[in-house]
Image (cartoon, rainbow, N blue to C red):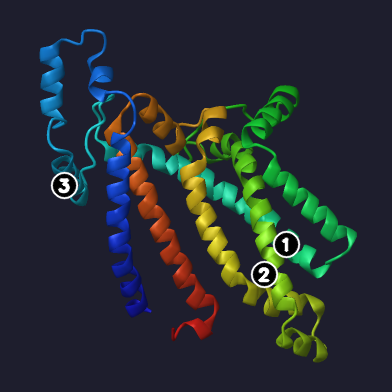
């Protein structure tokens, strides 16, 4: 297992280098000048030149890249042009918020999507299968921002069950934190649940046609045991792949949901950074997101070998 992880890490190194190059070069294509944003209304030529020298924006782009990546390898992602805070400090402040939101959304998605996919595959061709597919299609089709607004109007404004917006740190008040995160997590989780349901159904349909499933049934095993112990366990490999990738998407793609529910997470940070032309923050966030995706893929590969012993020798 350690040798396998080592090989995967060696493959990850050139991938991270390519991500860093794309992040840095594409950032330079954004319109606008961050120095003009930073200087405000004064825009004195001497001040502008001083700022360019201070942030090394006059250096050739290749020099800027190697300076940035060299500092990043030492844990220095630069300083925010807007707030003058270290980018790593900003990420450390916002990332736990988004991780909590993404984790709750993923739990909701798994609780809804996996059982629905298993039931849909088991009852293929029946009204249960039809209803599950219609619900999954609805979950994929309904925009998150519309569902979030409707839930705020119904659950918060009309019924008063949950807070309409805001965020409470889990360490300060766990119950209130869960209440403030429940609606946005459900909004994110429904779309992910629909994707998870479709993949679970597809994997289960393939497994249920296998010879060992017929053998298990011929032995007289209970249908619940056949479905859970034999079918679902062997269908978990593609499900784990999708789940890990979806978690990475949740970390990177909760922008609209965080804006609607006023959650100070990763998504709001990157939106503010883009509008403010805060290059260092955008670069740091995208680089961290890319590394997170690679890490999630590594976790998926390790999970394969834990769930399926036949893959351990490959």
Q: Which mark is residue 4?
A: none
Q: Is 98 rendered above or below residue 109?
A: above
Q: Which mark is residue 66?
A: 3
Q: Is 96 rendered above or below residue 229?
A: above
Sooner in the amino-acid sequence: mark 1 or mark 2: 1
Q: Which residue is mark 1?
A: 117
Find residue 110 and report its horizontal and vertical position in percent: 64, 57
Q: Nearer the viewer, residue 296 or 14?
A: 14
Q: Residues within 10 Å of mark 2 (few under 14, many from 20)?
A: many
The answer to whether the residues at label 1 and label 2 have Cβ atoms under 8 Å apart is: yes
Q: Residue at x 68, y 73 (%)?
A: 232
Q: Secondary structure at mark 3?
A: helix
For marks 2 and 3, give the one nearer the viewer: 3
Residue 177 picture quarter: top right
Q: Residues within 10 Å of mark 3 (few under 14, many from 20)?
A: few
Residue at mark 3 to residue at mark 1: CA–CA distance:
48 Å
Find residue 48 and report its horizontal and vertical position in percent: 16, 17
Q: Quadrant of the C terminus?
A: bottom left
Q: Residue at x 12, y 35 (%)?
A: 59
Residue 181 picture quarter: top right
Q: Is 178 on the left or on the right of 152, as rendered?
A: left
Residue at mark 2 to residue at mark 3: CA–CA distance:
45 Å
Find residue 205 and report its horizontal and vertical position in percent: 73, 71
Find residue 264 and report its horizontal and vertical position in percent: 45, 31
Q: Secondary structure at mark 1?
A: helix
Residue 161 visible in the displayed image: no
Residue 7 picture quarter: bottom left
Q: Which residue is mark 2?
A: 203
Residue at mark 1 to residue at mark 2: CA–CA distance:
9 Å
């Amino acid at each position: 297992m350690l040798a396998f992880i080592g090989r995967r890490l060696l493959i990850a190194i050139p991938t991270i280098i390519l991500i860093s190059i794309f992040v840095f070069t594409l950032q330079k294509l954004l319109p606008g000048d961050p120095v003009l944003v930073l200087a405000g209304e004064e825009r004195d030529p001497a001040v502008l030149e001083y700022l360019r020298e201070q942030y090394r924006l006059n250096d050739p782009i290749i020099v800027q890249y190697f300076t940035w990546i060299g500092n990043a390898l030492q844990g220095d992602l630069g300083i925010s042009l807007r707030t003058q805070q270290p980018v790593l400090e900003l990420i450390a402040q916002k990332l736990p918020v988004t991780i909590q939101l993404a984790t709750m959304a993923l739990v909701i998605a798994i609780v809804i999507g996996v059982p629905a996919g298993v039931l849909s595959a088991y009852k293929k061709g029946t009204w249960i299968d039809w209803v599950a597919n219609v619900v999954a299609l609805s979950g994929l089709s309904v925009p998150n921002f519309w569902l979030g607004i409707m839930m705020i109007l119904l659950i918060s404004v009309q019924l008063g069950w949950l807070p309409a917006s805001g965020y409470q740190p889990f360490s300060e008040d766990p119950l209130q934190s869960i209440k403030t995160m429940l609606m946005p997590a459900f909004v994110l989780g429904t779309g992910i649940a629909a994707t998870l349901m479709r993949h679970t159904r597809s994997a289960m349909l393939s497994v249920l046609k296998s010879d060992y499933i017929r053998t298990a049934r011929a032995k007289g095993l209970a249908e619940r045991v056949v479905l859970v112990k034999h079918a679902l366990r062997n269908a978990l490999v593609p499900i784990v792949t999708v789940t890990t990738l979806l978690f990475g998407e949740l970390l990177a793609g909760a922008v609209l949901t965080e804006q609607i529910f006023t959650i100070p997470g990763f998504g709001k940070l990157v939106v503010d950074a883009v509008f403010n032309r805060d290059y260092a923050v955008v670069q740091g966030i995208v680089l961290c997101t890319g590394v997170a995706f690679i890490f999630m893929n590594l976790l998926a590969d390790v999970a394969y070998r834990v769930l399926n012993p036949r893959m351990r020798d490959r």
